[in-house]
Amino acid sequence: MMNDLKKSNRNIWLGVAALLGFSSTAMAASGNLESSDFVGISFWLISMALIAATVFFFLERDRVAGKWKTSLTVSGLVTLVAAVHYFYMRDVWVATGSTPTVYRYIDWLITVPLLMIEFYLVLSAITKVPGGVFWRLMIGTLVMLVGGYVGEAGYVAVMPAFIVGMLGWAYILYEVFAGEASKINANQAPASVQSAFKTMRLIVTFGWAIYPLGYYFGYLTGQDPASSMKSLNIVYNLADVLNKIAFGVIIWSVAVAESEKK
């Protein structure tokens, strides 16, 4: 077992070293970061924080019970995928000064469904959860993301796309606040899991609210999107600290608490 643990940790560090090497190569290709480029600085800070979170979640897998390992693995995958996309987004911004919309939505199309899966996995660690919970969360997520993307990318008018995206988000909120997932949490989960679940859904409510607000102020107030893209990118970047890293930390906390129960 000890040899397996050492091998696992070694593989994690090799992966992190590869990420750091990739980041250094990308930096050299994109040019120097100006001290006055606060958007670029925010991209750098978040990309490094995501790497640190990835290492933490993967290493902590060995601390929790088997039924919680998948949840921590998914948390690590969320921050890993986001870190790689942040390298690209950072370089697009530093090199061109333009908003990396496509890369950001590719990131969200992978990481946001994984975040939604976490609700299902957390409940599955303590009881049997119907598959319908999983699929309802996935459907709401995809509707929300596709609606947002087609509006920001200019495929459809921004207002109809905004409404579709908001409906998808509302569908997710219904499931975690009043739907089957919420009922399972209230009726079958221990106190620590209930607390974590409630905090996770608050992040989905208030943390995710940053994205439609950014969309609204960037595209629906009559301003030129280019004039607001600096503040928009900083807001989106800071939001990912809450919505990806803090979200994973909550899951790690409950996984450790439940695993250490005698």
Image: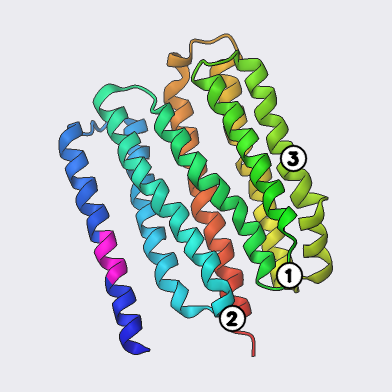
Residue at the spot of label 2: 259
Q: Position of residue 59 (x, y in %)?
A: 40, 72
Main SS, magenta residues: helix
Residue at the spot of label 1: 128
Pointer 1 with pointer 3, Cβ within 8 A: no
The residues tagged by marks 3 and 2 sit, at their Cα atoms, a distance apart of 32 Å
Compared across the picture, whether 74 is left or right of 38 comes to right
Q: Is 12 in the magenta? A: yes
Compared across the picture, whether 18 is left or right of 47 comes to left
In the displayed structure, 94 sits above or below 195; it is above
Residue 36 seen from this side: no
Q: Residues within 10 Å of mark 3 (few under 14, many from 20)?
A: some
Residue at the spot of label 3: 171
Q: Position of residue 10 (x, y in %)?
A: 27, 73
Q: Under tag 3, what secondary structure?
A: helix
Q: Which numbered disc flags the more N-terminal residue, 3 or 2? A: 3
Q: Which corner quadrant of the image does residue 96 belong to?
A: top left
Q: Position of residue 216 (x, y in %)?
A: 61, 22
Q: Position of residue 29 (x, y in %)?
A: 16, 35
Which of 96 and 123 lies nearest the eye of the viewer?
123
Camera-near label (1 vs 2) is 1
**Quadrant of the image for the N terminus?**
bottom left
| Magenta residues, start to end | 11-16
Q: Residue at x 67, y 68 (%)?
A: 124
Q: Under tag 2, what secondary structure?
A: helix
Q: Under tag 1, what secondary structure?
A: loop
Specify how the rendered protein is coloured.
Answer: rainbow
Q: Which corner quadrant of the image does residue 99 belong to?
A: top left
Name the kind of residue labelled 1 in the image: Lys
Q: Residues within 10 Å of mark 2 (few under 14, many from 20)?
A: some
